[in-house]
Image (cartoon, rainbow, N blue to C red):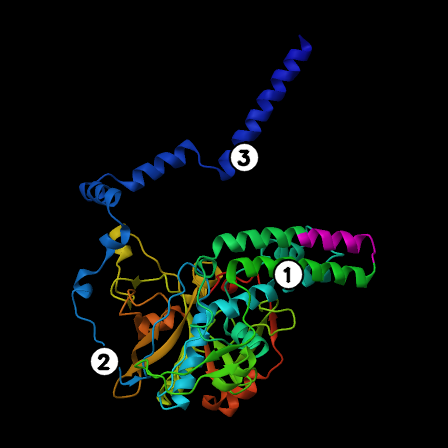
Amino acid sequence: MRKQLILLAMCLLSAGLCAQKTADGGITPVMLDQMRQSAGQTRTHRALQNAMAGLSIDDLARNYTSAATPLDTHFSIETPKQSITDQKSSGRCWMFSGLNVLRADFSARHADSLTVEFSQDYLFFYDQLEKANLFLQGVLDTAREPMESERVRFFFQHPINDGGTFCGVADLAPKYGLVPASVVPETYSAENTSRMRALVASKLREFGLQLRRMVAEKQKAEAILALKTRQLGDIYRLLCLTLGEPVKEFTYAFRDKDGKVRTAPRTFTPQQFYDFVVGKELKGSFIMVMNDPRREYHKTYEVEWDRHSYDGTNWRYLNLPMEDIEQLAIAQLRAGRKLYSSYDVGKFLDRKRGYADLQNFDYASLLDTSFPMDKAERISTFDSGSTHAMTLTAVDLDAEGHPLKWKVENSWGTASGQAGYLIMTAEWFREFMFRLVVDKEFVSGQLLREAEQKPVLVMPEDPLFQFDE
């Protein structure tokens, strides 16, 4: 009997502790009743509830006064148009935007009489191979750390991806060269990367464990390198199966915008083709700027491990106010030069019209609430970040030279937006534009000196860098 009373007392005590814990942090019946009362059940509430049960929030929140107003498509400064590309179901916007800038520069040097479109499939092959080596070598560099360490978890959580930045183009194109799209067309796995990426990631995690075991067993460095090379050989074979084996030599004749052949056929290696169409070393020819209002402006920052190859370049940027970034963009556009840029493109974008405007959707009125966070707060809370790279092509200025709207060449095909382009208001641009790559010839000496400061190291877990471009 005494034993039963003790057990009963323990159960009551346990129940009391659980109840106390719920009262301190969980949802209590009293709280739930207060929530029900605050939600209200007015006629307006019921009407909205019925509407949202069968219609999308965007359709209901759409500002139809704004949507009915014809778009102003005039731009006071606009670079020459070129063919629109389509990244399909892949995260390669960084590559499409970067290569679009390079081919526009090539056409500009030839007075638009020669055009070219680069093979994304070809360069993507080496991007994935280099990222595989980046992972394996990163695993070796941290092999003596426990699996639970932050950096080891980072590698195994993100062994490979198809996102990136312009740094990838600057590192990969000079090393492996470029190839015309007609020579190496897109494959299914290039346009639909998810399954290939998942399978390669699984193999890399398996290989990473093998390398960690060799280090734990204190095997010789030569044996470890030999195993890593064999592992990369397996990855190379998988990439050949899904993306095609990279071409080593090809014959190509350049055409004009009308498709007429303008040069005699010539044989190139990918590196020779890069030399012909780009003609310069990309590294050191540009600076990358970013608007991150959480951090001090006019300081340089570098993101650790945010690169495409082990011996490549981390994403390094000069943090500037939007006013300075706008002036850099205007200067390069005035010279007829397009720019790599990136945005949080999912916010307030009317995809059908190809129009990004803070007034497109009135979510606050529809939901009877407010969304007051500013840009810095949105970044800090993972609510916003750089999600998509596009090619900045035009700006419309008022009489005082202030931007009214901007235009970008997208990589979602011609059926998207304004025949493949998006128009962005100046207000939207300031809130959701993040990164810009500017040729050094358009940057002042003061900003160039600031870009050469010793960078402040930023961890890849930072909220702003959690979104793949």
**Residue 159 position by quadrant:** bottom right
Range shown magenta? 207-219
In the image, which is nearer the foreground, mark 3 or mark 1?
Answer: 1
Residue underneath mark 2: 74
- Helix, strand or loop at disc 1? helix
- Verify whether residue 209 appears in magenta: yes
| Residue 240, placed above or below residue 85 | above
Residue underneath mark 3: 21
**Is 452 in front, or is 336?**
336
Q: Main secondary structure of the magenta part?
A: helix
Pointer 2 or 1: first along the chain? 2
Q: CA distance from mark 3 to mark 2?
A: 62 Å
Are circles 3 and 2 on residues that touch, CB within 8 Å? no
In the image, taking residue 132 as reference, residue 367 lies left or right, namely: left
In the image, which is nearer the foreground, mark 2 or mark 1?
Answer: 1
- Verify whether residue 251 appears in magenta: no
**Is 308 in front, or is 279?**
279
Q: CA distance from mark 3 to mark 1?
A: 43 Å
Q: Which mark is residue 174?
A: none
| Residue 172, placed above or below residue 347 | below
**Residue 395 position by quadrant:** bottom left
In the image, taking residue 144 as reference, residue 415 lies left or right, namely: left
Q: Report crowding for label 1: few under 14, some 14 to 19, many 20 or more residues within 10 A (C-alpha).
A: many
Pointer 3 or 1: first along the chain? 3
- Identify the amino acid type marked 3: Lys
Q: At x 28% / y 56%, what residue is drawn?
A: 363
- Identify the amino acid type marked 1: Phe
Residue underneath mark 1: 135
Image spot of residue 227 (x, y percent) = 74, 58
Q: Report crowding for label 3: few under 14, some 14 to 19, many 20 or more residues within 10 A (C-alpha).
A: few
Q: CA distance from mark 2 to mark 1?
A: 47 Å
In the image, taking residue 305 as reference, residue 110 lies left or right, namely: left
